[in-house]
Structure formats: C-alpha cells, structure tokens
Image (tube, rainbow, N blue to C red):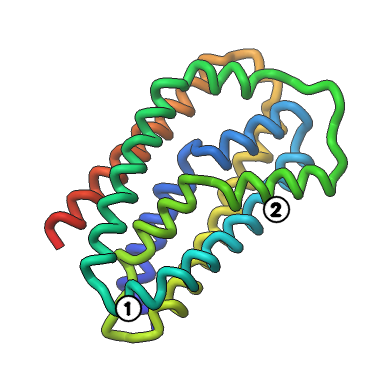
Amino acid sequence: MISAGQLATFLVASMAIIIVPGPSVLFTLARGVAWGRTVAVLTVLGNSTGTLVLSVIVAVGLGPLLAHSKVFAVVLQLAGGCYLLWLGYDALRHRHEHARAMAQREAQRPSNVVVVRQGFVVGILNPKSLVFFAAVFPHFVDRSQGNVTLQLLLFGVIFSVMAFCSDATWGVIAGTAREWLADSPTRLVVLRTIGACVMMTLGVIIVASAITS
C-alpha cells in the first residue's frame, strides 16, 4: 500500500514538523517546567490521542476528494503552505510573550485525568497538525495505488506515534531541567524562534511543490 520511498520521505517530513517547538511541544514544555516529568508525559499522551483523532477525521473527510481531484489537492497544499507561513511568522512575532507564559508556574497541580484531557484538547485543536494533515499528507499519497483514505489513516497513525515519542522526550527533558529553563526566558525564546523558522521553511517548500506539480 505504501512504498518504501513514500514512507521514507514521509518520515523525514513528519520529523521536521514534529521536533520543532510548535503549540503541542510548547504546551508540553510548559507543563514539564511547571510540574515535572509525569505531568509532561501525561500531557503528551492526551495530546497524541487528540492528534490521532484529528488525523482520522481529516483522512475520512479528505480521502474521497483527494482520490478524484488533483486540483483540490493542489489548492489544499497551497492553502496549507500559506497557513504554515503565517503560523511561523506569528510564532516569531510573539516569541517573547510565549516564552514568558511558558516560564510562569501555576500553584496547584491538576489531576492526571485533567492533564490528559487538557492535552487531548490541545492536540485535536492544534492548527499545526491540522495544516500538516490536510496539506502535507496528500503530498505523499500514491493515488495510483487506490485506497487513498486508508493511506491517509496509516500516515495518521505513524505520525501520532512519532509525535508521542518526540513530544514525550521534550517533556522529560523539560521536567528534568525545569529550573534551567524557567530561570532563562532567553532559552525559551531561542526554541520558539527555531520552531518559527522551520514552520516557515516547510510552508515555502509546500507552496513551491504545489505550484510546480
């Protein structure tokens, strides 16, 4: 169903968008800094579950359209690429405010259920994931193989597992180095700046690919 070439390029693109400090990673880092490793990992569990549900919704909704309309796929990629550019610009513009918010500590630790639920909400409403699923997933679909929806579902599962492993690592690091991060907002600004630049770069690549396809 998915060729080795498809899978390899998809893994590279997924890792590029997963490892940068986007909304989910920043949320996880904030939880790790505030309450430690356990809360950070539980946040990632909820977040990854929300991401998986979002990928299923996108796959079921977009699969039939992508299977029958190349024009729709190109328009979707253009829109998604432009939105990634905007997200990157917005993250860069507000990097100092985001860093200050992440460095703040809340007094009372929420329950495990609340932590997972909050992570789920962030995951399912994450604009970065939505754009990635809608604009990037179709780029790796081999329409000649058929079963477009199934291919999108498989990509969603793979992406969600990768996101869990990567974000959990960020969370553990933040929980372990909570004092080091919280005491230096400059380091948080650097993380946010790197993430913004990567998102804008990916947006340019997606737009260029859609134009030349």
- Residue visible at 53% across and 17% down? 97
Q: CA distance from mark 1 to mark 2?
A: 32 Å
Residue on which the image places disc 1: 67
Report the front residue among 32 and 78. Answer: 78
Residue sitting at x 41%, y 61%: 11
- Dot 2 corresponds to which residue? 45
Residue drawn at (48%, 51%), measured in percent from left and top?
Answer: 129
> Hey, what amino acid is under mark 2?
Leu
Residue 125, compared with residue 104, is above or below; it is below
Residue nearer the viewer, 85 or 181: 85
Q: Nearer the viewer, residue 198 or 130?
A: 130
> Horizontal and vertical percent for residue 17?
42, 47
Label 2 neighbour load within 10 Å: few <14, some 14-19, many 20+: many
Check disc 1 and report its element: helix, strand or loop. Answer: helix
Q: Is residue 53 above or below residue 154?
A: above
Q: Quadrant of residue 37?
A: top right
Outermost residue to the left:
212
Looking at the rendered image, the disc whose residue lies closer to the viewer, 1 or 2, is 1
Q: Is residue 93 above or below residue 128?
A: above
Q: Quadrant of residue 28?
A: top right
Marks counted in the figure total 2
Among numbered discs 1 and 2, the one appearing first in the sequence: 2
Q: Residue at x 35, y 29 (%)?
A: 89
Looking at numbered disc 1 in the image, what kind of residue is underneath it?
A: Ala
Q: Where is residue 152? Give x, y as percent.
A: 44, 71
Tell me if I can see residue 34 in this picture. yes
Judge left or right: residue 193 versus residue 27: left
Secondary structure, mark 2, is helix
